Amino acid sequence: EVQLLESGGGLVPPGESLRLSCAASGFSFSSYAMSWVRQAPGKGLEWVSALSGSAYARYFADSVKGRFTISRDNSKNTLYLQMSSLRAEDTAVYYCVKSETGDPPGYFDSWGQGTLVTVSS
Amino acid sequence: EIVMTQSPATLSVSPGERATLSCRASQSVSSKLAWYQQKPGQAPRLLIYDASTRATGIPDRISGSGSGTEFTLTISSLQSEDFAVYYCQQYKIWPPWTFGHGTKVEIK
């Protein structure tokens, strides 16, 4: 069974940084692209960033480009999202999601339960 | 960027009735279209991919159709567990991978 467990969320002041982690199990982690998708309170889904299984190809939404970095440690089956220069509009639940292919990501066949990031002073 | 437009925003349906949800892409996405279901306080769940293929464990009362720019998700006989928000997502032209704003299916 695929399991994705996010951690690292919390309350952070504007302009600060935060790193999210996603521990994966139940599948061959390095074979699949992984993404972060976020959902602001009461809003819809927004794709944020994706990383190929080999970690060769990285993709970012314009809204986070230059501020967020995605990485993975295939030896630890863990995906990361390093977020810097955080803004109030980054407040959301961040979901770790698995794609059905190694690269590029396509649809998202497994989702974690999410971790809440709140950017506020 | 491909814009995905879902309609209606809210659909009121009685249990046992059919629900038809629409999703339109701003340009052709071929059949690279997925549907997700999200219940309150839960993560989204994949229902349909490649426009019409049901994901593992999805009952056959849920079906998807369409190609190009027009897509439909149909729930043939609504059960209590089907009342939720539904999102479509394209994966033809990226980045970004884009979602619609969702259709909420509520009890009439």
Image (spheres, rainbow, N blue to C red):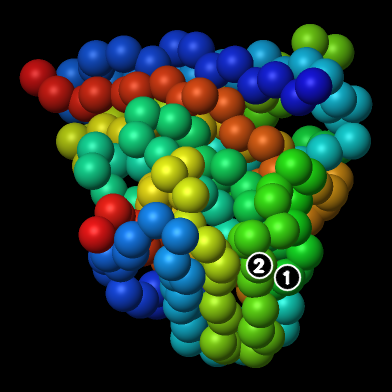
Instruction: Give a yes or no on whether discs 1 and 2 share a subunit.
Output: yes
Q: Residue at x 45, y 60 (%)?
A: B16
Mark 1, residues whose alpha carbon is within 10 Å: few (<14), some, or many (≥20)? many
Q: Is residue B89 left or right of residue B20?
A: right
The residue positioned 69% from the left and 51% from the top of the image is B59
Q: Which residue is mark 1?
A: B52
For disc 2, the chain is B
Q: Is residue B34 above or below residue A114?
A: below
Can you see residue B92? no
The answer to whether residue B59 is seen in the rendering is yes
Instruction: Report the residue at 29% width, 55% height from top.
Output: B106
Dot 2 amino acid type: Ser
Q: Earlier in the sequence, mark 1 or mark 2?
A: 1
In this view, the residue in front, A110 or A18, is A110
Q: Quick one: B38 or A19, which is closer to the camera? A: B38
The C terminus of chain B lies in which quarter of the figure? bottom left
Residue B11 locus on image (x, y percent)? 30, 67
Tags 1 and 2 in contact by the CB under 8 Å rule?
yes
Rendered position, B39 above or below B62: above
- Type of the residue with mark 1: Ser
Q: Measured from the top left, where is residue A31 in percent x and y? A: 89, 35
Which of discs 1 and 2 lies nearer the camera? The answer is 2
> Height in image: A38 above or below B36?
above
